[in-house]
Image (tube, grey):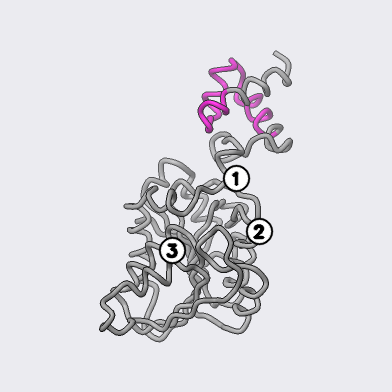
């Protein structure tokens, strides 16, 4: 079978299942492991699919990001466990950047159990979740909402946000990601969101990245943190079945499974 025909068949399979292991490609096309790997590398190089540990995934599966209300309902149990684990790395008096995302929105709910932080964010949902209490109750933290444009998403963005971030120096940046790769680092689908995350990271002493297992071995459109810039990656136990978690431990400074 010619390579072009094999590539076409792999693409057809990906359109149905979104993710293929090397072993399945070998079985479906009756090829050797080396041939399957060459085809995977070729599809990745052509931008027609994305190579990941153990196989290949559809570009549509890794590049786009669902609306916040949809993402908020996905892997909720895992995201809450990740958020609670992140709390263990915070202490009273710290200044913390938090970006916009479903995991950071859940983190904001959990942060109501702590007090004494200065929290700087561009997420309207984070601010809402932090301040959901009786009107007579004082806020547990000092909350700073970064000013900027608001379009279709519940967050501020644009040059004004970046300029405001650069006024501060935080102890920790608690960020979410559309994709995390042991080799490529953290990435986002929207360039403006990636720029905000990058600025928060640059102006923090430590980057704690929160990502459930579905985000691992995924490379989205715009990278904002190299692998060596991630201080801690917090993910859930299901990551062990999805990716080579030992590779993440080798490539990143610290990986926590919850």
* Marks 3 & 1, CB-CB < 8 Å contact: no
Name the mark on residue 63: 1
Taking the magenta stretch, the answer to whether it contains residue 216 is no
- Mark 1 near mark 2, Cβ–Cβ under 8 Å? no
The mark that comes first in sequence, 1 or 2, is 1
Q: Residue 34 placed where, x, y %?
A: 64, 26
- Looking at the image, the residue that sits furthest to the top is 1
Q: Is residue 156 left or right of 163 when viewed as pictured?
A: left
What percent of the width, then of the height, locates residue 58? 58, 35
Q: Quadrant of residue 229?
A: bottom right
The quarter of the image holding the N terminus is: top right
Which of the marked residues, 3 or 1, is nearer the chain's N terminus? 1
Give the answer, above or below, for where 257 lies relative to 31: below
Viewer-nearest residue: 185 or 15: 15
In depth, the one of 123 and 61 nearer the eye is 123
Q: Secondary structure at mark 2?
A: helix
| Residue at (73, 16) in percent of width and height | 2
Check if residue 37 falls in the magenta segment.
Answer: yes
How many numbered marks, from 0 up? 3
Relative horizontal placement of residue 102, taking residue 155 as reference (left or right):
left
Magenta range: 13-41
Q: Under tag 1, what secondary structure? A: helix
The numbered mark, 2 or 3, whose residue comes first in the sequence reads 3
Q: State whether the magenta stretch is mostly helix, strand or loop.
A: helix
The residue located at (67%, 28%) in the rendering is 39
Distance of label 3 from label 1 (alpha carbons): 20 Å
Which residue is labeled 2 in the image?
191
| Residue 220 percent across, percent down from the top left | 61, 49
Q: Which residue is mark 3?
A: 104
Mark 2–mark 3 contact, CB under 8 Å?
Answer: no
Q: Tell me the quarter of the image containing the C terminus.
A: bottom left
Picture coordinates of residue 82, whole percent (x, y): 37, 59
């Amino acid at each position: 079978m010619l390579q072009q025909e094999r590539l076409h068949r792999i693409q057809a399979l990906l359109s149905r299942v979104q993710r293929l292991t090397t072993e399945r490609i070998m079985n479906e096309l009756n090829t050797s492991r080396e041939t399957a790997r060459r085809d995977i590398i070729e599809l990745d190089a052509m931008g027609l699919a994305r190579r990941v540990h153990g196989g290949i995934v559809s570009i549509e599966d890794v590049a786009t990001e669902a609306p916040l209300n949809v993402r908020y309902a996905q892997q909720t149990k895992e995201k809450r466990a990740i958020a609670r684990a992140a709390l263990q790395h915070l202490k009273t008096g710290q200044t913390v950047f938090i970006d916009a995302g479903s995991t950071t929105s859940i983190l904001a709910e959990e942060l109501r159990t702590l007090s004494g932080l200065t929290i700087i964010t561009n997420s309207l949902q984070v601010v809402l979740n932090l301040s959901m209490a009786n009107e007579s109750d004082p806020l547990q933290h000092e909350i700073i909402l970064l000013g900027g444009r608001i379009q279709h998403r519940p967050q501020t963005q644009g040059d004004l946000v970046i300029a405001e971030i650069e006024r501060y120096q935080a102890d920790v940046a608690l960020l979410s990601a559309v994709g995390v790769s042991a080799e490529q680092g953290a990435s986002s689908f929207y360039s403006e969101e990636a720029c905000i995350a990058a600025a928060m990271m640059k102006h923090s002493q430590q980057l704690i990245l929160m990502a459930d297992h579905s985000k691992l071995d995924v490379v989205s459109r715009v990278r904002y943190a190299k692998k060596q810039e991630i201080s801690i990656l917090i993910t859930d136990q299901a990551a062990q079945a999805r990716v080579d978690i030992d590779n993440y431990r080798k490539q990143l400074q610290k990986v926590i499974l919850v």
